[in-house]
Amino acid sequence: MKPANDDEYASPPCLMHTFDPLTGDRVIDGDVVRWRKAERERLIAVRLAIPAVERRRLSQRIVTGLDRALGDVSGRIVSVYWPFRGEPDLRSWIKGLEARGAVGALPVVVHRHAPLVFRSWRRDEPLEPGVWKIPVPSHGIAVTPDIVIAPVVGFDPHCFRLGYGSGFYDRTLAALPRRTRIVGVGYEQQAIRTIYPQDHDVAMGMIVTENGIVTPIVTPPDAS
């Protein structure tokens, strides 16, 4: 008889993310790529259609939710982002981090296939155009954040994030220390039933919208 080994008793990988949650049909990677592209374009259009005055109001509600979710951030390094294509505007919040005893940081693209680098930034320090002309710190030092605030194009009940498709945040979040808190932010209109998460996708610890804090639902044990 062939001797047993630990591998034979390992639990099989859960494949539920490869099935449509409503129809039960198998979804292959090519289908996911095409679907994500179309859904990404739809969600960005919806976001851009929100009037600027309304986006400012929703952003302020999201800031209130962030404060409630994060609590005291003194002594922490907090990476936020510079708003792009209608994303929630958290600039006033990051500019106030120093007064709260935290170190602010912004993500920087250094190479197309590399993870993001986080550079420290204070409100009076210069910025320069980065990729897609998004401002990045000119002289900030590289830091490892304790908290990463990541914008979403879409999100699902498991707090998986649909991004722009470049994979920068996927590579970055996968490389961060486990202690790093990862918080997604977006508008309630960006909630979808699933992003069809793949192996490289990293779930957020929570998503903060203008309507409150979304935490990941737990898949029942017998769903795999």
Image (tube, rainbow, N blue to C red):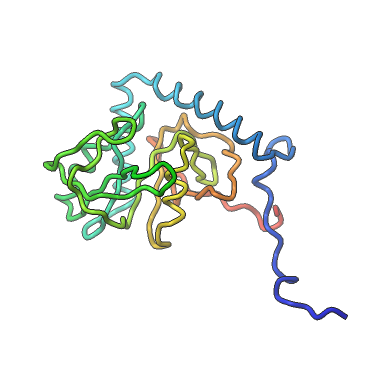
Answer above or below: position of 167 versus 11.
Answer: above
Question: Residue at the location (41% across, 25% down)?
Answer: 47
* Image-quadrant location for residue 20: top right
* Image-quadrant location for residue 92: top left
Question: Residue at the location (11% across, 41% down)?
Answer: 124
Horizontal and vertical percent position of residue 184 = 41, 44
Please identify the residue farthest to the left as the structure is shown.
124
86 displayed left or right of 38: left
Horizontal and vertical percent position of residue 153 = 45, 33
Quadrant position of the C terminus in the picture: bottom right
> What is the total number of numbered labels drawn onto the structure image?
0
Horizontal and vertical percent position of residue 18 = 67, 44
38 displayed left or right of 163: right
Horizontal and vertical percent position of residue 63 = 29, 40
157 displayed left or right of 213: right
Please identify the residue farthest to the right as the structure is shown.
1
Question: Residue at the location (38% across, 21% down)?
Answer: 50
Quadrant position of the N terminus in the picture: bottom right
87 displayed left or right of 23: left
Question: Residue at the location (49% across, 42% down)?
Answer: 161
